[in-house]
Image (tube, rainbow, N blue to C red):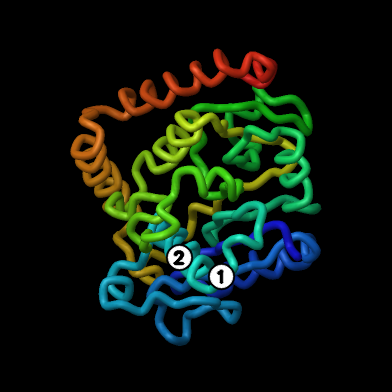
Amino acid sequence: MKSVAAIVLNRNLPEQTDRLVARLRSVDSDHVDVFVVDAGSETDRRSKFTTWSADSPDAKTKGLRYSRGMNFGLVNLVREGRFDRYEAFFFLTNDLEFEEGPIIAPLLGCLEEHPRVGILSPCSRNWGERLLIPDRGTKYFWFIHNTAFLVRRSFIEAVANLDTGTYMDLLFDGSNFRGYAMEMELIAKAYANDWSAAITTRVFVKKDESHLLTKADLIKTEPFEENLRLYIQEGKEWMRRKYGFNSRWSMQMYVKLFYDKFFQFHPEYAEYMI
């Protein structure tokens, strides 16, 4: 039985999706089952590895984006009785590129060594956070901006709506359509429930942001600048409506409070604090 279920989100970019799926299967076939969520793609723009398709009128028009897409994959795994088979779930967008070498195995090794890590992110060589982490090391963070999260099943079971959840609310808040502060909300749930979030330099990843710049028409989303404007505008409205925060800084301080408390309760992990 494989240890990890990887959920990859595709919308009209089958070449990128298929390349990522093939990479995962080629280097970590003993550890991972890969599932592709197709978010309302045109029929001829679906991945050849598509597992589930979201074909509602809304998905066809707007897609799912990260939160709804990952929820959609989890909902289907729960419905099919496969959720309990996996130790962790790897949430991935199709614009991610990993450096050479194994991906899943080193991340699983990290989870084994850090039993209170509920969310694990590979590092990027372009991040300032890399300077805080030893070579092939791990540090616990209170903010991680990524779309590659390895999430432990027991953490999901502690915070998710597994019995009644839908693609709108199983783990992520689907009403936050573009995902503004999505990662901070997830990390807050971790530290508030005695879990941590970490970045490791055992695996390196980068995001190819050129797709939003050059393929927005294929993805059927707004051009990059307009999407960014809506990401901030709609996201700040969501954050104020749900949490009463009027700035991203307030949300960050909310997460940092739980982060600091975690190390008060677990001083044995102080060496991994930043």
Question: Which of the marked residues, 1 or 2, is nearer the chain's N terminus?
Answer: 2
Say whether residue 61 is left or right of residue 273: left
**Residue at the (28%, 73%) spot, across then down:** 61
Residue 12 sits in quarter: bottom left
Please provide percent x and percent y for residue 255.
Answer: 42, 26
Which mark's residue is nearer the viewer, 1 or 2?
1
Q: Which residue is mark 2?
A: 75
Reply above or below: 68 against 185. below
Residue flagged by tag 1: what amino acid is it? Gly
Q: Which residue is mark 1?
A: 81
Give SS at disc 1.
loop
Q: Give the position of the C terminus as an image quadrant.
A: top right
Q: In this orientation, which residue lies closer to the viewer: 218 or 136? A: 136
Please provide percent x and percent y for residue 42.
Answer: 40, 82
Give the distance between the C-alpha atoms of the residues marked 1 and 2, in whole angstroms: 10 Å
Please provide percent x and percent y for residue 197.
Answer: 57, 34
Give SS at disc 2.
helix
**Residue at the (52%, 43%) spot, across then down:** 146
